[in-house]
Image (spheres, rainbow, N blue to C red):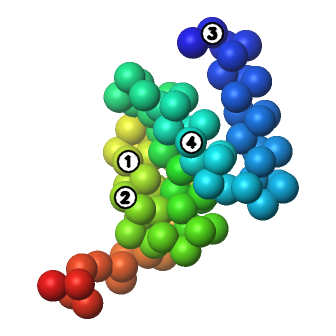
């Protein structure tokens, strides 16, 4: 994916979020992250965390925030704060 493609997809995803279409924004971010183990230095993981949190899927949000921090802990400070904020999200109520 070229830098231009990345920017176009990012603008499209942000517009979808602004328009309330978070589910399709997630599809774009997942497409962008496919084959990129670093999640573009954690940026895409952070964006996915934000989207899932907006949808109320706190388990998925916590996972993606954690992946963002894993890939770039010095830069993904907002993701680290969000991960900490969701630290009480667990599995006890499911098992």
Q: Please give left or right for residue 69 compared with residue 40 in the image.
A: left
Viewer-nearest of discs 4 and 2: 4
Q: Residue at x 58, y 47 (%)?
A: 26
Q: Secondary structure at mark 4?
A: helix
- How far apart are labels 1 and 4 at the CA level? 17 Å
- Point out the tag, 1 or 4, that comes first from the N-terminus: 4
Quarter placement of the N terminus: top right
How crowded pointer 1 is (Cα within 10 Å; few <14, some 14-19, many 20+) is rated as: many
- Name the residue rendered at 37%, 48% in the picture: 67
Residue sitting at x 82%, y 55% = 18
Secondary element at image label 1: helix
- Give the image location of residue 90, x and y in percent: 29, 79
Q: Nearer the viewer, mark 3 or mark 1?
A: 3
Judging by the rendered image, the residue that carries numbered circle 4 is 27
Q: Mark 2 — residue?
A: 63
The circle on residue 2 is: 3
């Amino acid at each position: 994916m070229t830098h231009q493609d990345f920017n176009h997809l990012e603008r499209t995803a942000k517009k979808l979020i602004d328009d309330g279409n978070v589910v399709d924004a997630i599809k774009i971010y997942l497409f962008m992250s496919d084959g990129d183990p670093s999640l573009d230095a954690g940026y895409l993981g952070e964006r996915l965390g934000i989207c899932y949190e907006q949808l109320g899927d706190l388990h998925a949000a916590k996972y993606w925030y954690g992946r963002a921090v894993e890939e770039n802990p010095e830069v993904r400070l907002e993701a680290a704060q969000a991960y900490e904020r969701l630290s009480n999200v667990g599995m006890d109520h499911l098992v």
